[in-house]
Image: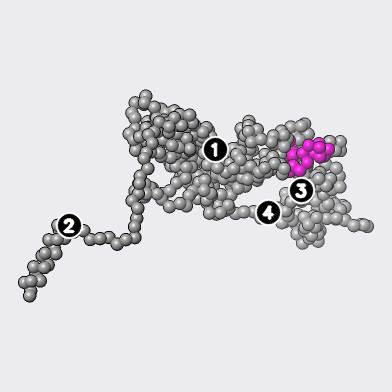
Amino acid sequence: MEGHLLMSAKERRHKSVLEEVDRKRMTIQEAARRLGLSYRHCRRLYKRFCEQGDAGLVHRGRGRRSNRAKATQMKKAVLKRYKQRYKGFGPTLAAENLAKDGYKVDHETLRRWLLADGQWKRCRKRRRYRSRRERKDHFGELVQMDGSHHHWFGAQKTACCLMNMVDDATGHTLSVMAEQETTQAAMLLLQAWCELYGVPKALYTDKKSVFVTAREPTLEEQLAGEQPKTAFGKACAKLRIEIIIAHSPQAKGRVERNHGVYQDRFVKELALRRITTIEGANKALHDGFIDTLNDKFARTPASETDFHCPLPKQLDLADVFCLEQHRTVQNDWTIRYQNRCYQITEDNHRLPKPKDKILVRTRLDATVHLYLGDKPLNYRLLTNAELANRIAEQPEQTPRVEPQKTNQPRKPSNTPWRQNVTLMFADKAKDTL
């Protein structure tokens, strides 16, 4: 046969084995076992080999158009739509959005089209990260929390922080957008998780000051035998949530990798919807975007037992996720807090005594609440005019006159005691003589 014949490694192996059959050194049944083929298919191959030679072993579909190939017009329309609306999207995400527009195409087919058209470049596949720690078996057994700082609204806009929680067993995610990774943002996200799923057993966080503190314990903490906690740590202690500290980003790899999903898909979703505000981003998150991610990427846990604890009916999460400080009651039943003066009213069932310590809670909605023990106190905020009148009504105190200090030596005083001591020593001197 003249010309060149292109054969694959599999076809060359078929050729070498069937040549042994042709030389009567092997039976067709033995050749079928060696090639991993059925006896009937091996007979068909050997028949074509005898009739056509090496060309009979070449796959008959090579060089022919696939019966499932997309039409040329369809391909041009998809590439045009991608260039107009989804430029820069990955093939997988772009295929999902194109399906919504009526262009149903597999992501691998779209990848080949984009590579051939020069609209996509091959990305070097990173080495697979192999973690020694397996997933937890139960939903709610361990939830990873972290903040992702990124230019969510474009490179021209200020970077914001996406607070994100990912369950270790299932991959379920919940997030909220904020300006920075603050205590209020972390509390708001954890409160939403508790209201949606229940109280998780443990949180896996990094060493940021929002979650842990390195300060020395106060005297009250030392006497109570407690470790220093942040405001977020105190809220977790009330719900008996254990905080586990990760010493590297790779330790909490699930939430770190989930950041990449948000930075790819959510940035493009915000651009499509033309959202440029934090309020709009939070609305988009909870209007279906998070549900879409969970439906696509979440998995079934190894165990059906849910480790989330239900919230007690009498528990108010607003009193759990708050900032707490203690203040001392003054003689006129007022306290100072955040440069403001609060008057405890007389209509309280139990009035605190002056110099008593009361608890001041600032909730996430910025409202202030006073407590004596676990009982709330009624109060009112004093205006600047009332404070000025109180200061004017206070009596003027006469300045204290300090005695003038002199450098002259102090003269001994002739007190009766000193005179008696002098006479006593004089009498002893006479007796000695």
* Pointer 3 residue: 41
Alpha carbon separation for disc pair 1 and 4: 32 Å
* Pointer 2 residue: 415
Predominant SS along the magenta part: helix
Snapshot quadrant of residue 315? top left
* Pointer 4 residue: 126
The quarter of the image holding the N terminus is bottom right
Sequence-first disc among 1 and 4 = 4
Sequence-first disc among 2 and 4 = 4
Sequence-first disc among 3 and 1 = 3
Q: Does 428 appear above or below 163?
A: below
* Pointer 1 residue: 189
Residue type at the position of mark 3: His
At 86% from the left edge and 53% from the top edge, which residue is drawn?
A: 55
Residue type at the position of mark 2: Thr
Relative to 115, is 198 on the left or the right? left
The quarter of the image holding the C terminus is bottom left
Sequence-first disc among 3 and 4 = 3
Snapshot quadrant of residue 169? top right
User: In the image shown, does 22 or 213 lie closer to the viewer?
Assistant: 213
Sequence-first disc among 1 and 2 = 1
Residue type at the position of mark 4: Arg
Residue type at the position of mark 1: Leu
Span highlighted in magenta in the image? 79-97
- In the rendered image, the residue lying farthest to the left is 431
User: In the image shown, does 320 or 340 lie closer to the viewer?
Assistant: 340
At 37% from the left edge and 38% from the top edge, which residue is drawn?
A: 397
- Please tell me whether residue 163 belongs to the stretch shown in magenta: no
Q: Name the front one of labels 3 and 4.
A: 4
Alpha carbon separation for disc pair 1 and 2: 79 Å
Relative to 110, is 289 on the left or the right? left
